[in-house]
Amino acid sequence: MGKTIMIVDDSASLRQVVGIALKGAGYEVLEGCDGKDALAKLDGRKVHLIISDVNMPNMDGISFVKALKQLPAYRFTPVIMLTTEAGDDKKREGQAAGAKAWVVKPFQPPQMLNAVSKLILP
Amino acid sequence: MSTNMDDALQTFIVESRELLQTMEASLLEIGQGGDDTENINAIFRAAHTIKGSAGLFSLDPIVAFTHVAESVLDRVRAQRIAMDPALARLFLDVCDQMGALVERVASGLEVNGELQARSDELARQLSHHLEGTAVFPVAGDWPDGAPAQVAPPVFGPGCVTSGLWHISLRGGPDLLRFGLDPLSILRYLGTFGQIVSLEMVLAGIPRLNQLDPETCYMGFELSFASKADAQTIEDSFAFVRDDCTVRLIPPYGPIADYRALFADMPEDSLLLGQMLLRCGSLTQAELAQALATQEWLAEDEAGQAPAPRLGEVLVDQQLVEQPVIDAALERQQQVRQTKGAEVTLIRVDAAKLDQLINLVGELIIAGAGAQLAARRFKAPALVEATGVLSRLVEDVRDSALTLRMVQIGATFNRFRRVVRDVAIELDKDIQLDIRGGETELDKTIVEKIGDPLTHIVRNALDHGIESAADRVARGKPAQGRLMLNAFHESGSIVIEVSDDGGGLKKERILAKAMERGLVAEGQGLSDKDIFNLVFEPGFSTAEQVSNLSGRGVGMDVVKRNIQALRGTVDLESSEGHGTTVRIRLPLTLAIIDGFLIGAGPSSYVVPLEQVVECIELPLAGQLASGANYLNLRGEVLPFIRLRDLFEIPGEPPRRENVVVVQYAGERAGLVVDQLFGEFQTVIKPLGKVFSHIRCIGGSTILGSGEVALILDVPGLVRHVTARETGLSRSRQGSLAATA
Amino acid sequence: MNESEQPCLAVSRVAIAGEMTIFTARDWRDRLLSAMEAPGDVELDLGMVSEVDAAGIQLLVSLVLEARATDRALRLVAVAERITEAFEFCRLTDFFREALPAQA
C-alpha cells in the first residue's frame, strides 16, 4: 500500500520528472499546477507528503501552505518547499508557515528522493 | 533516457516555448503604463521555471545561463534595481538566447561553441547588474553523494574506544505537529549505515491522563555505524534541527562530548549513562570518567574559568572533518562576497589591535624619555641613536594606526539602499552621489558615525528634498540629488551630506528658536549661527512629523554623538538651493602629533594640525588695556591666557607667546609662557570625574613621566569667540584705534 | 477508523483500527482514556492498525504508564505487523512484553 505524495509546481515537465522518480520509488503521485489547483485536487484525500514550489501563479507556495495548515486533514502533513539558492527569506517564511523541509532548485531526482525519505517511509 | 523521460523532455520543450513567449510579451509591456509588478513577476517566473526544470534534465548550459538571468530578476523583483528600458532590451536578448538553447535541446544537439559564447557574453552583461551579490554555485557541481573519507580515528586518553557514531535526539514539543516523524529520520539513517543499537528515551512521556497526544515527549539515543562523512549524517537532521535537540558524537569521539551531552540533556545522568552503556557508546570506565569530569567541569565553571571557544575545541580535538570545514568556508565566502566592499583580508580581534596601539603608545613615551635622557647626558652618539629610534617608532605608530583605518565607502554604500527605500516611501525621485569613498578613518569612528549619518541623510530626504512636482514648479530638475562626500583636511576627516532641496528657512528657524527661548529677540546672529540652532536640544522645524525623521531623535543627539567622537558638525544652507551638513572628525582616537606648551609649572598639548603659527605677545603697553584681542596683520585675533583659564598663580614671564590655533575656520590665540615644540602625544582619556571640565580633551604622559593636559581646541575656540561675539561691534572700532 | 467497546465483567476492550498517527492521536487518546476510567482490566486490539508513526508509539507508551500508575492490567490481544515492526525498531518489545499476546 504505497503512500501518496502531491507535487505542486507550475512546470508540467518538473511534475512529470518528479512524478516518474516518486512512482519509481513506490509512491502514488498527485499533481497540482499551483496552490489553488492543489487545494481543489486534494479535497480531503489522504496525502502523506506535499512538495510545493514557492513561485507559482494564482496562489504561491507560502499562501498554499498557510491555507493547508488550516485544514484538519492536512494540518500535520509534512511539506517540502522548493526554494531557490537565493531564496533564504522564502525558506524562512515557509518554515514559519509550517513547511519545515526544503529542496533547493535546480535539483535532480535523487536529491528529491533523499528529502522525501527523511520525512516519510515508502 | 527512458521513454517516460523522453516524454517529459518533450513537455519541457513545449512548456519552455510557452514560457518564453510569455516572457517576451511581458518584457515588451514593461514601461507601457500597465502593471509592471505583474509583468516582472511573470518574467521572473518564466526564468525560474525553466531553470528548475532544466536542472532535472541536467541541461547544464540552460541552468547556468538562466541562473544569472534569474538572479538579476530577483533583484528587480526585490526593487533593488529597476527594469529600465536598457535592461528590458537586454532581457529580450536573454529571452532569445534561452529560446535558442531550448531549440538546441529540441533538435537533440549539444550546445556548440558559438551558442555558448553568446551565453557567456549575455551572462557577462547581466552580471553587471549583480554587483555586490553573492554568486551561488550553479549547475555542474551537483553533490555527487560520494562519501568523503572519515577522518582517521583519533585515539587518545580523552577519547572513547567505540568506533561508532553516537546520536542523541530529543524531540521538541512541536516536532510532530510539523509532520516531522523522528522514526522516519532514524530509518533514513538506515539507508547509508546501520543503527547498531537504539534506546528510546521514555522518561519525558507523561501518563495518558496528562498526555497531549500531539506534543512530542520522546527522545532517542543510538549508536550508528556508517562510512558516511559528518556532513551527510548532519544533513539527515536538517529538517528537524529547529525543532529538536540533536547531538552527534563521531567515532572515537572525545569524552568531553559525552560530558557535554550529560550536561545538556534533561534526564538524570545515571539513567542516561545506563542507556549509553547499553548502546555500547561508552564503556563502564569511560562513563565513570565522563561523569567525573562533568563534576570537575562544573567546579571549574563555578571558578569562572574561561570557556574554550567551540572552534578551538573542534580544531584541537580534530573533530571537524574536511567536508564540514569546506562547507563552513564556502558559507563564509558567500557572506564575504555579499559584503562586497567590506572585504578584509585577515580578521583580527579588535582588542588585539587596541593592545598593539596601546603598546606603541607606551613605546612612544619610553622613546621620548630615552631621548630626553640622551640630551641630558649630551652624548652625541646616544642622541643620534635615539633620534633614529624615534623616527622608527613614528613609522611604527603610523603603520599601527593604519591597521585601524578603514575606508568610509562601505558605510556610504549602505545609504544607497536607505535612499532608495526612503525615496519610494516618500514618493520622491532622488539620486545619490557618493564621492571620496576611499577616504580612510579609524574603525571605531566608522562604527559610531553610522547612526548620526543615517539621521542626517533621512532628514535631507524627508525635509530637504522637495517632491518632484514642487521641484519642477521651482524650475529645478525633477530628480533630487543627495551627495555624500568625504575628504581629509588638516588632520581631520570631513564628511559632507549635501542636498539640492529647499534649504533651511532662516525666518522660520529664528521664530522657532525665539518661541523656544533659545535666542533673545534682537540678538544679532549670523546666518551660520541661525542654521546651527537646529542642533540645539528640543529644536525641530518639521511642520509635519513624518514617520521617518519624527522619531524623537533630534539633531541635538546627532551633534552630541559627533562631539563624543571629538568631532564637530555644522550646517550651511541656501534657501531654495539646498543644505550641506558638514561633519569633522579626528582621523584617529589614539595618538596625535602635538605641540607642547607651558604655562607656569604645567605643560599642555595642542594638536599640531590645529596650530597655525606662534607669535610673541605684544608688550602690555601695546595692547588696549584689558583687551582680549590683538591685531594680527590687520585681522582681529581674540585670545585667552592659559594662566587665567586654568587659574595658575604667580607672575607670567616678561615675554609671553601666543599660539594661534584654528578650528573650522575660526582662529583664536592662546597666551602661554613657553613653547616647547612638537611632541608625539598618546591620548589617555580623562576619567569621568574630569569629563565636565571644559577645554580639556584628554591627558598624556611626557617623557619625564609628568602628566600634560591636552587642550580641546574646538572648545577653546568656541569659548573665546563666544566671549567676543557680544563685543564684535565695539571691537572693530577699538581695533582701528590701536592699529 | 472504527472502534468498539465490549464491556465485559471488569474488562474493557478497545479496538484500534486504521491510522494511529498524529492525525488521529487525539481521538484515540480520548477513547483510551475513557476505557481507562472504567474499572477493571483493559484489552487492546491493535490487529487492524494500518499505519503507525511516532505519535502512535508515544500514545501506546503513555497508555502503559497510565495502566502502571493506576495498577491495572493491560493486554494486547492482537498486534498488526506495522506495530510489531515499530516496537522492534524502537527496541520497545521488552517494554510492552507483559502486555503483548503470548505468541509475540
Image (cartoon, coloured by chain):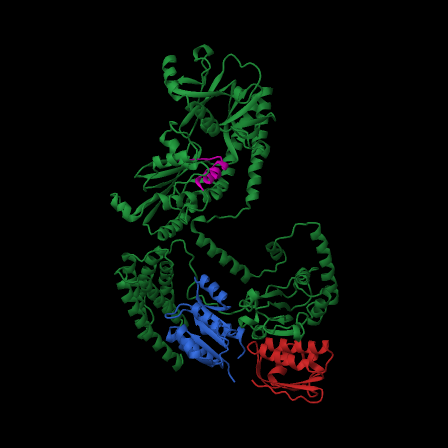
Chain colours: A blue, B green, C red
Vertical side of B266 occupied by B385: above or below: above
| Residue B618 forms part of the magenta stretch | no
Q: Nearer the viewer, residue B158 or B445?
A: B445
Q: Residue furthest top?
A: B621
Vertical side of A38 occupied by B154: above or below: above
Residue C70 horizontal/vertical position (percent): 72, 77
> How many numbered circles are shown?
0
Residue B149 horizontal/vertical position (percent): 57, 66
Vertical side of B264 occupied by B181: above or below: below
Left or right: residue B73 versus residue B684 is: left
* First to last magenta residue range: B554-570
**Residue B428 visible in the displayed image:** yes
Q: Which quarter of the image is occupied by the C terminus of chain B?
A: top left
Q: Which quarter of the image is occupied by the N terminus of chain B?
A: bottom left
Residue C63, quarter of the rendered image: bottom right
Residue B609, quarter of the rendered image: top left
Residue B228 horizontal/vertical position (percent): 57, 69
| Residue B557 forms part of the magenta stretch | yes
Left or right: residue B165 versus residue B324 is: right
Left or right: residue B291 versus residue B531 is: right
Q: Nearer the viewer, residue A61 or B513?
A: B513
Residue at screen point 42% across, 23% down:
B726
**Residue B61 visible in the displayed image:** no
Residue at screen point 49% across, 66% down:
A95
Residue B645 horizontal/vertical position (percent): 52, 22
Vertical side of B402 occupied by B114: above or below: below
Residue at screen point 37% across, 32% down:
B528
Residue at screen point 58% across, 40% down:
B355
